Amino acid sequence: MNLNKQELFWILPTALVSGAVLSWLQGAGWLSGWLGFSFLFLLSLILLVSSMKWAGGGRTLAWVVALAFALRLAGGVAAYTLLPVYGYPDSKDGQAGYTYTDAHKRDEQAWKLASSDKPILGAFSGEYSSDQYGGLLALSALTYRYLSPDAQRPLMLVLLAAFVAALGIPFFWKAANQVFGEKVAWASAWIFALYPESILLGGSAMREPYLMTLSALAFWGFVEWRNVVGAGSPRPISAIISLSLSLLGILLLSPAVAVFTLILFAGWMFFSRERANISWKSIVLFAIVFLIGLFALSSSLNRKGVFDKTSPMYVLNDWIQLSVKWNVYQIERESGWIQKLFDEMPEGVRLPFVATYGILQPVLPAALVVPTLPIWKIIYVLRALGWYALLPLLILSFVTGSSPHVGAKRADDRRESRSIFVWLALLAWTWILLAALRGGGDQWDNPRYRAIMFMWQALVAGVVWVWWRETKSIWFTCVVLCDVVFILIFGQWYASRYFYVGGQLPFAVMIALIVGLWGTILGGGLWLDKMRKQPRAM
C-alpha cells in the first residue's frame, strides 16, 4: 500500500459518505449497513488507488479506472432502484431490482447460506442450483456473513462487483503496454472500461466481472513471467503469485475459462521466441492445472449423471452437442419467423445460421425498433450499440494480422507481435463462436457468455484501432459501411414488421440484398486498396 496522507485524506471521507448513501438506498438497518458499506468502499478505494500508482499510468489511467468504477456502480444502483418502479410488474427479478435471473437466485441462496450455521464451503457441495461451480456463491455468502450479518443487502454485492471489475484495468493496461506498446494499451483500456455489456455485468452480482479481472491479473502475471524467462533471470515472486492465484480463482469460478486461458498462454509461448527457454517444471505445472481444470469442468457438467461416459473429453463433446441441439430447438420454438425459415432451409444450413444469428446478438435493429418499456429500451440499445461498434474492429483482425504495421514497442519484435496477435484473434473468435452456439439467439445468455473473455477481445480491438489510426486502411471504412448497411436494411425489416413502415421484403430477399451490397462494398474496397498500393507516376 503506497498511499500518502493526502490520498488517505480524501479516501476516508469518500468511503464514509458513499457508504452512508448506499446504506440509505438499501433501507435495511442503516447503521450496520453504513459500517459494512463504508468498510467495503474504503478497501475498494485503497486497492484501486494503489493499483493505479503501481501500474504507472498517471492521471489518464486514474480517470479510466475511476470512470469504470463509477459507471458500473451507478448502473447497478440505478437498476436496483429503478427496475421495481419502471420495469415489468410481472417480472420477479425486475421487481427485486435484478437485471439477471442468475444474480437474483445466487443472491437469495448466498443469503440463505450466510444466515445458516453451515460452513461457507458448502457452496461447492452442489446443493445450491444458482452456481454451477460454487466460487461466486461462496464469495457472496462470505460477504454477507461478515459484513452484513443482520440483513440481506444486494447493493453490497453490486459494490463488490463494480470494484472487482475496475481493479483489473491497471493490470490489463500494464500488460498490454509491455506487449503491444502504450498506444494499444490506452485504446484497449478505454474499450475495456466503456463497453456497455461489461458495464452492465460489472454492476451485477455476476461472475463475469470477476473472470475479466482475474484474466487481467493472469495476463499481467504471464507477461511478467514470460519476460523474465526470455531474459534468463530469476522469476519474480509477484508474477508467480499473480498468475497462480488468478488461475486458481478462475478455476473456482469457471473451469472452462481456466482451460481456455491455459490454451491461450500455451499458444502464446509457442509463437514467441522464448519457447526454447521454458523449463520442464513450468510445462508440468501448466499441464497439472490444465488437467485439474478439465476434470473439474467435466465433473461439474456431469454433476447429475446426465452422460454415460465419464471421460472428460466424452463429457465435453456430448455436452457441446446437446447444448447446440437444445439452442437450435429453443430458437425455432421461440420465434415463428425463424421456425418458418428452418422449414424452408436445408438441414445442413441450420447450424451456420444459428452461429451467425448468435454472433449478431444482441441485434441492434431489433433493439432500436421492437417496442418495450423505456428503461429496458435504454439497456437493450446501449448493449447492442456497444457490440456493433466493437464487431467491426474484431472483423478487421483478420486483415490486421497480415499487416506489417501491428504495433510493438521495438521494430524487431513486430513479427513476433503479429504471430501473437493472430493467435489472440483466433482464440477470441473461437470463444465468440462457442458462445454463439451455446447461447444461440438468446439476447442475454449469448452476449454474457461472450463477455467472459471480453478482456482478450478488447486487446484485439485495441490493436486493430491503433493499426487503423496508423495506416488509414480503406478496410476500416468498408467494414463500417457493411455494418451500417446491415443495420439500416434489417432495421427497416423490423420496422415494417412491427409498425408497418414501408413494404416488408421477404426474408430471403432481404438477406440477398444485404449480401449483394456487402459484395459491392468489399469489391470497391479491393479496387481502392489496389489503387493505393500502385506506385504513382512521376
Image (cartoon, rainbow, N blue to C red):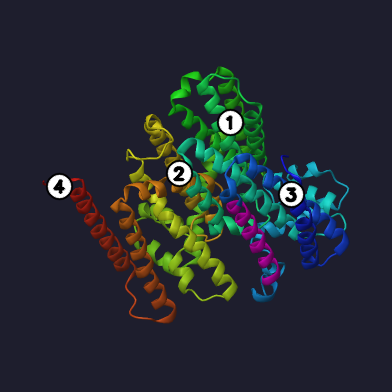
Q: Amino acid at mark 4?
A: Arg
Residue at the disc numbered 2: 430
Mark toward the start of the polypeptide (1 vs 2):
1
Determine whether 169 is above or below 442 in the image: above
Q: Which residues are magenta?
A: 63-82
Residue 340 in the figure: left or right of residue 69:
left
**Residue at image x 41%, y 34%?**
417
Label at residue 6: 3
**Residue at image x 30%, y 52%?**
475
Disc 1: CA contacts within 10 A as few (<14), some (14-19) or many (>=20): many
Q: Amino acid at mark 3?
A: Gln
Q: Secondary structure at mark 3?
A: helix
Of discs 3 and 4, which sits in the foreground? 3
Q: Quadrant of residue 204?
A: bottom right
Residue at the disc numbered 1: 290
Picture coordinates of residue 213 (x, y %)? 62, 45
Picture coordinates of residue 174 (x, y %)? 55, 40
Q: CA distance from mark 4 to mark 1?
A: 55 Å
Picture coordinates of residue 295 (x, y %)? 62, 33
